[in-house]
Image (cartoon, grey):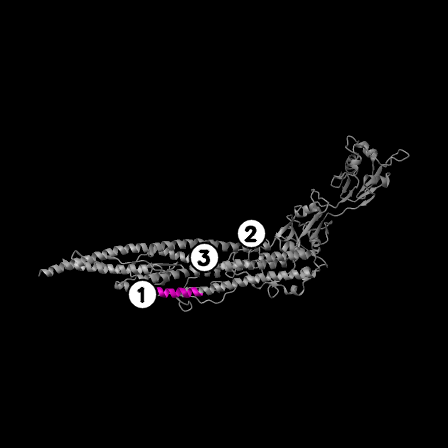
Amino acid sequence: MSISGLDAALSGLRVAQQQLNVISANVANVSTPDYTRKILPQESSVILGETAGVRSSPIIRKVDLNLERDLWTQVSSTEALGVKAGYLNQIQQFHGSSDAEISIAAEIARLRDAFVELSNAPDDNLLLQQAVTEAGQVAGKFNSFATMLTQMRNDAQDQMRISVDTVNARLAEIADLNRQIKANTALGRTTAALEDLRDSAIKDLSAEMQITFFTRGDGVLVVQTSQGQQLADENVAPLFFDPTPVGPASSYPTSAAGIYIGGDPADVLTAFDITATGIGGRIGAYIEMRDSVLPQYQAQLDELAHKMAMRFDAQGVRLFTDATGAIPADTAPVPNPPGPLTPVPYVGFASVIQVNEAIENDYSLLRNSTLSGLTVQDGSSEFLRRIVEFTFGDFEYLEAQGNVDLRVSTLPDTLQNAFGLNPQAQILGNVDIETLSSGVDLNAAPGNPFLPPSGPPLLDDFTISINGGAPFTVDLGAVALAYPTPPAASGADALVNYLNTDVFATAMGLTPAEASAQLNQFGQLIITSQYDIDIGSGTMGDDGLEYLGLEAGNTPTVSPYFDIQVGKDDIVRIDVDPGDTEIDLLAKLNAVPGIDATIDAGTGFLNIRPGPGFGGDIRLITGPIMSAGGNSVVQELFGTSNPVSGVAHPVFRTQNLGASVTLSTRITTATSLVDYAQKMISAQTEDVNVAEAAQKDEQNFRDLLERQFLDDSGVNLDEELSQLIVIQTAYAASAKTISAIDDMFKTLLNAF
């Protein structure tokens, strides 16, 4: 019994010494990065059913693998957002603060201001030069931003290569440690220190890419991508990445290199492309910057540059072009008929946009237009005004759009007949005879000349003839008898009633549409007819007519008309003459300089716009002649009294952009150039703010997980010292047991 007791005590001493060594190592490595607390498991040694001491197992670690898994995932997220925030901050620095006014939006606004100033003094050569110089500043800003985006994409790609090399190095390290751990596990040796090294390598690997893993029964930790592709066990499936420089027209997978597992896809048929599988970590962020974020910014910039060049060109001034003097076509990315998507022709235009060399060589083209065949008067600011109002505005031009079918050429009819637009003669008096004769006959009105000095008869009649017919004598005395005042409100009202009822309707047999009289709001007499009107002075003479506000003579009919004005050009009158059809009307309109008029072959609707070849504004002024239906000429021809409206610029595209034909600009509400530029900068600024806020949140969560992991798996000095006391007590107890057994042996020996 004493021999077995001695064995038990000695085993206790050995295990206690091992425990002390483990505790000493824990305390010594309390500040060592990635060191985890080690534990020496121990258990009773049982022989033939009886306890024979204590024995230890291989040293193990105190690690919560689930917590460690969460930490590694969080490391990937934090590192990815750190990369993204770093790149986006470079964009923010390029735009500068709003107070600095160095952004593209500020440059475009300054260009607009230069044209405003120039439009007020179009012959000022200094202002012309300043406008061209400012245009060069705008183009240079586009070039600088585009160059920066391309450089950043290449920088991201270079960092991808470095990260891939780091991943392969860590995978090789993990595979080597797996082999050692597997061997030690088979031999029953501790693998704790090797597992610490492996965890450190995995943590470094997680910073580069997001991984998943599981541990086999033999101690090997199998590393996989987040999508489950195996990267390492005892062997390595390395990443392959062989990039070439990228440009504005480069996109993955067509012309930008991908990342593969297993080797070069040109040599290894089983190589698997993981570029678009959500790699995560730094590599995932670099891929996002190279293939999504920065190309999206390039698409926004190209869209703004292209539409800016188009909008200047639409007003007759080709200010911005590529190196050949051209502007890329505005072809949609979706072909018609449907087929494979093709990139818009202006991908990368922001990189090459420049001021038109023709304008660089002749500043006056800003004022005179770059369109051939156009003559602009000296001192005219017409094209400059169009640029200010339409290039930088919300509309490309104004147009008059009808909704009435004008087609009468196939009928035995004319526009006048079809729409009741009859010719008209009109006499407008220039005296307020209503006030003069208020409450009294015209013969009794104050200051009237109708009573001659010798007395009666009154010299108070004049003649009127319609359409060359026999003159009718209008006697003011007869007027007063037929329509006495009162009850007539005035002698003027009585004259109007007499003309309409007794003269035109009864004596001449005319309808109100053919001839009528009325007083306007100023009390002046108006006589209107579809035929020529002749006024004779009669016995009242010219003085009497003058008192009534009339004048002897012939008033011929005029055709219905409306006036049209292009920009600030002279107003041109368009008559709808007898016999005119829509073809004649179209010819008259297109004869006006700066007018492009069409009649839709399917609907017969009339459309008038400035042109051809440029934008601008137009104005329609209807004439006084009304149709049989009581509408103006403009109302009859266009279906509305105000047919002129703004036509929006070609829209800023938002979808299927970039070399990949997959990008969206996210800018959907902008209409003007400055508005688009400001919204572009705002969207990019928002990306920076979102990335920085997300990075801060993710970093805080990572710090929390790291604290939890250290609290759970790290070395706690208080805990180690407490454990040391326990071990020392056990050691002392084993030592006393050995001492007691030694005394027993001595007593036994002395007994002999």
Q: Amino acid at mark 2?
A: Thr
User: Could one spot residue 685 in this view of the protein?
Assistant: yes
Single out the mark in the foreground, 2 or 1.
1
Q: How dense is the environment of label 2, judged by Cα within 10 Å: few (below 14), some, or many (20 and up)?
A: few
Image position of 510 with respect to 747: above or below: above
Which residue in the structure is indicated by mark 3? 81
Q: For the residue labelled by badge 2, is the local secondary structure a helix, a strand or a loop?
A: loop
Which residue in the structure is indicated by mark 1? 179
User: Could one spot residue 337 in this view of the protein?
Assistant: no
Q: Amino acid at mark 3?
A: Leu
Q: For the residue labelled by badge 1, is the local secondary structure a helix, a strand or a loop?
A: helix
The magenta span reads 161-178
Q: Amino acid at mark 1?
A: Arg
Q: Residue at x 76, y 47 (%)?
A: 558
Which residue in the structure is indicated by mark 2? 669
The residue sitting at the top extreme is 487
Q: Is residue 81 magenta?
A: no
User: Which residue occupies the foreground of this view, 65 or 731?
Assistant: 731
Image position of 497 with respect to 680: above or below: above
Res 438 quadrant in image = top right
For the image, the number of numbered tags is 3
Q: Is residue 452 left or right of residue 416?
A: right
Q: Is residue 168 magenta?
A: yes
Q: Which percent across, then down, holds residue 659? A: 51, 61
In the rendered image, which quarter contains the N terminus? bottom left
Q: How dense is the environment of label 1, judged by Cα within 10 Å: few (below 14), some, or many (20 and up)?
A: some
